[in-house]
Image (cartoon, coloured by chain):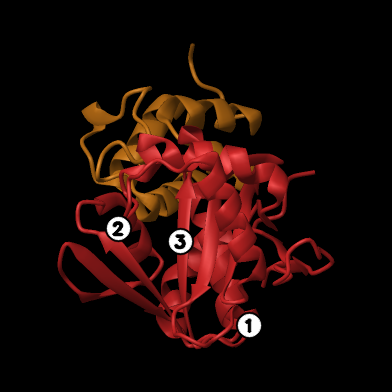
Amino acid sequence: MKNEQILINAFSTSLGIEAAMVTQDLTYNTIPQWDSTAHMILIAELEDQFKVMLDTDDIIDMGSVAKAKEILAKYDIEFDA
Amino acid sequence: MPDINNTNSTQANKAATLKGYQVTLRPIGEDDLERLRQWRNDPSVSQFMLSQADISKEQQQAWFKKIQRDTSQQHFIIEYKERAIGSLNIKARLVGETIENATVIEPGLYISDPTYRNNIVAFSPSLLIIDYCFEQLGCQKLVAVVKSDNHAALKYNQKLGYKIVKQGDLIEIELNFDDYQAHSKTLKSLLSRTPRT
């Protein structure tokens, strides 16, 4: 499975939303499903799926889907342009 | 447990500087007054305060003089990456108690910087001050009053373990140590990881 799809699935599962809702500009706290609890679940899911350990600055910065891709790229996770 | 630097002596009640969960809480000083006044008068902040009246420079100076002498409360600037992003205070709830020996403490907080208002780091100052209140000051419970239309604040506090004790236009909430420990564990672990080298 491509990393883009893994990312979408991780967001969809963690936030309990349809995959179609996982757009690049989806942002923390702008939908009821993406609250602090879901954010913690999301971090755990992303770490599990991509086999990375995010540091706290990245956890704080991960405020959108686009930002998540940018952060994961720092951990050598590649996404198609 | 927060790092505490108690060398600051500019305030009569000697508030400590607290560090943890990526943020710093430092006692407010005279240089902060105008910035605090502008934050507090901003409708995005004042809309959820009990009073929406604009605060003048003179009122702000008078308030600062009062809190410097008042041992029942402490006021802090919240800093993230050395940038001031909001303000926090704690007050002894019961008459006659100082903040040092308070059994019940009422925290108040706002994030003035919109960048961090909708961000997980908004929990950091609360985690830091609640640790301080329970573990350093030894208080028994925390209480707060939230306007009933401030759904974000209510939800935020419930995530920290606060429970509603009285409904109304003003909702009263309380937090005890056990509930706090149970609710904050994962949040604390995420916000206190060691930075990558």
Callout 3 amino acid: Gly
Q: Which mark is residue B155?
A: 2
Q: Nearer the viewer, residue A45 or B19?
A: B19
In the picture provided, is B59 more to the left or to the right than B24? left
Q: Earlier in the sequence, mark 3 or mark 1?
A: 1
Q: Chain of mark 2?
A: B
Q: CA distance from mark 3 to mark 2?
A: 15 Å
Q: Chain coloured orange: which letter?
A: A
Q: CA distance from mark 1 to mark 2?
A: 29 Å
In the picture provided, is B112 more to the left or to the right than B163? right
Q: Crowding at label 2, few (<14), some or many (≥20) Cα neighbours within 10 Å? A: some
Q: Nearer the viewer, residue B73 or B140?
A: B73
The spot of residue B24 in percent (x, y) is 68, 54
Q: Chain of mark 1?
A: B
Residue B29 in view in this figure: yes
Q: Which residue is mark 3?
A: B108
Q: Nearer the viewer, residue B24 or B120?
A: B24
Q: Which mark is residue B100?
A: 1
Chain B: give its colour: red
Q: Are marks 3 and 2 on the same chain?
A: yes
Residue A28 in view in this figure: no
Who's the residue at 55% across and 37% down the image? A61
Quarter that holds the C terminus of chain B = top right
The spot of residue B179 in percent (x, y) is 40, 79
Who's the residue at 23% across and 67% down the image? B171
Callout 2 amino acid: Lys
Badge nearest the viewer, 1 or 2? 1
Give above or below for B84 relative to B98: above
Q: Nearer the viewer, residue B131 or B64?
A: B64
Q: Which mark is residue B60?
A: none
